[in-house]
Image (cartoon, rainbow, N blue to C red):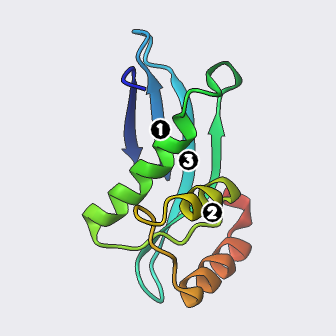
Amino acid sequence: MSDIEIRDDRAAGRLEAFGGDGGGEVVGHIEYFVLASPAPALVPVHTLVEPAHEGRGIAGALARELYALAAREGVPVAPLCPYVVRWAARHPEEAPAADPELLRAAREWLAAHSERF
């Protein structure tokens, strides 16, 4: 995993993993949005790793960095992405459980803005 660099592209709503092969290609990403109400939160919606890079721990590294990013910003994560939900359940020490009200608000926002994802 040391050959992967993870960067947040907040404007695009993507946490991206770049390959370290010198080409700097995006080898995986988490799509997310920032929920403003009832409280600020990061809401991951979809995780993707390019097929040629699967099995290298990239998705897990992305999920870990998403929670670390949220912790640095002092906001919770309200995961809607099935992969992130499973990862969080396996890593409760790094991924605090989301408030049910926050999850409800995130689902409502996503339903109202589904064209974005």
Question: From this viewpoint, is residue 10 visible?
Answer: no
The x and y percentages for residue 92 are: 48, 66
Instruction: Classify residue 2 as left or right of residue 113.
Output: left
**Above or below — where is 98 with respect to 15?**
below
Residue 56 in which image quadrant: top right
Q: Please, what is the three-letter code of the amino acid marked with disc 3? A: Ile
Q: Which mark is residue 16?
A: 1
- Within 10 Å of disc 3 (Cα), the crowding (few <14, some 14-19, many 20+) is many
Mark 2 highlights which residue?
85
Residue 81 in which image quadrant: bottom right
Q: Are marks 2 and 3 in contact (CB under 8 Å)?
A: no
Q: Please, what is the three-letter code of the amino acid marked with disc 2? A: Val
Residue at 56% over, 47% down? 30
- Within 10 Å of disc 1 (Cα), the crowding (few <14, some 14-19, many 20+) is many
- Within 10 Å of disc 2 (Cα), the crowding (few <14, some 14-19, many 20+) is some
The x and y percentages for residue 82 are: 70, 58
115 or 5: nearer the viewer: 5
Callout 3: SS: strand
Mark 3 highlights which residue?
30
Residue at 41% over, 65% down? 93
**Above or below — where is 53 with respect to 72?**
above
Question: From this viewpoint, is residue 60 visible?
Answer: yes
What is the spatial separation of the Cα atoms under label 1 and label 3, in whole angstroms?
A: 7 Å
Discs 2/1, front: 2
Q: Earlier in the sequence, mark 2 or mark 3?
A: 3
115 or 47: nearer the viewer: 47
Q: Which mark is residue 110?
A: none
Residue at 65% over, 27% down? 54
